[in-house]
Amino acid sequence: MEKIRNAIREGDTYLGIELGSTRIKAVLIDKEHTPIAKGSHNWKNKLENGIWTYSLDDIWTGLRDCYAQLAKDVHDKYDVELETIGGMGISAMMHGYMVFDKKDNLLVPFRTWRNTITSEASNKLTELFGFNIPQRWSIAHLYQAILNNEDHIAKISHITTLAGYIHWQLTGNKVLGIGDASSVFPIDDKTHQYNSSMLSKFTNLIGDNKFPWKIEEILPKILTAGEMAGVISDKGTKLLDPTGRLNANIAMCPPEGDAGTGMVATNAVKKRTGNISAGTSIFAMVVLEKPLSKVSPEIDIITTPSGDAVAMVHCNNCLGDIDAWVKLLGDAASLLGAEFDINTLYSKLYNNAFEGDADCGELLSYNYISGEHITGFQEGRPLFMRTPHSNFNLANFIRANLYSACASLKIGMRILVEQEGAALDSITGHGGFFKQKYVGQRIMSAVIDAPVTVMSTAGEGGPWGMAILAAYMQNNRGEKLVDYLMNKVFVEAECTTINPNAKDVEGFKKYMQRYQTNLKVERVATETFKTKEK
């Protein structure tokens, strides 16, 4: 205990903060990379005027509360104040659209990764570049705004991501870690900078508009893992900690996206390794040994925090719908006077899924709270179906919803692994889907028909990965990130691996046949079942 107190007093600690879709989380680690304090803040996006967004007030209120909870945890556990930190970093949901004018005013509300409103731009840029440009990428949002003749375009001075915006406000530096930057504009594998050929093509594409900016002028500067990205300013400390206790001049590492921090947190930055992050959204990433043979709209190419190419299958929807069902079932139990912990409810329901049929008894669920580009939906309608002859019981109901959370991912993984033959030695899971021990692993191993590993640190997730990147910045001594993780962070990592169950694999195959055959029903639902936005 005294050792930790001294580390906190002397700033021999590292802080990672990550803004996820439903929670903002902070993790403070010691020099052994062990979490010693945490903080969090719950929040949610809003659908306003057809746009999924978070307000700037929500961002800063959430960040301050998250940091305050961290500082309180430090004080409560160790009876010391958190005044200085050895290094820190900001991570957030990748992709999206934040643009500012010369006076640093946000020109339009933050457009998050969840929006599927840029299909025209996405398709045209993919064809122009010969490189997949997903709808949620910043450049797709920018070009769609140009196609829409939105009046803010000529006023743009700077474009960035959520992590980049917060880092800029804390330090004054308009930079991005290369992993986050790779979802703003395509990266050149050799130079680790924005692809110059594609920059030229984009310039020619919009040349007739005669905007007062060039694309390379408004993009943030790219940094790689291990580089220093500035220090937190006096203004920045007040934004984060209005109490005034936190000192300025704390070194900050390059801001990263949640994909990059997930790779770090699962030790999946080495070629032929992969990880699956499953929470509000779900995505799988494989660090590539060689380039893919063709462009596939289901597969994005991003990078590790060090700049190595990564194939990503990203789906907008994962646990949102089943979380709503669990709440409903909990409400029903409460009506009967039951008292229970929410984690116990999840555990009981999830484990009960294996008491049912491997194919869910011919039940079917679509978890589309928002649109899903993998299957071509701009909007979503959560939908549950059964026939009069389906085996409708609780176990099958829960399993159907767990399968649904992974179904869209399976479509992309088929292309990546089966068609492209992407080499994969190991895959590690993390995120809320894997929080219930054994359940998420068994389901996911059936989905991808391969062993799935979960580390004891899986619950720490992205903010822990971001804190590790801050520690790496200060302590790498020229060591590559892949070696630093292996030698310093995961050398004694505890992990469990579950192999696919043959009955589960066959059951999921039947479920997927039902899922893909009936997508037309989901299509009709989005076209006919309309509701007013809240």
Image (cartoon, helix red, strand yellow):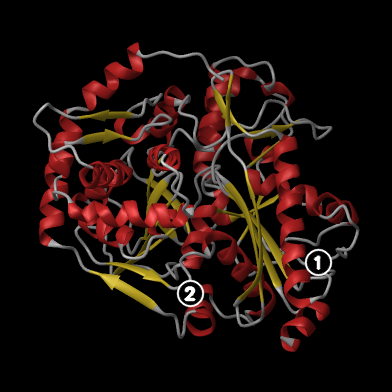
CA–CA distance in space, label 1 to label 2: 25 Å
Q: Is residue 385 visible?
A: yes
Q: Residues within 10 Å of mark 2 (few under 14, many from 20)?
A: some
Quadrant in the picture for the N terminus: bottom right
* Residue assigned mark 2: 482
Q: Amino acid at mark 1?
A: Ile
Q: Amino acid at mark 2?
A: Val
Residue 191 found in image quarter: bottom right
Task: Please tell me whether residue 365 is drawn above or below residue 264 in the rendered image.
Answer: above
Task: Please tell me whether residue 470 is drawn above or below residue 404 in the rendered image.
Answer: below
Residue 308: where, in percent of width, then height?
46, 62
Q: Earlier in the sequence, mark 1 or mark 2?
A: 1
Look at the numbered disc 2 and give the secondary structure of its residue: helix
Look at the numbered disc 1 and give the secondary structure of its residue: loop
Residue 435: where, in percent of width, then height?
42, 60
* Residue assigned mark 1: 250
Q: Nearer the viewer, mark 1 or mark 2?
A: 1
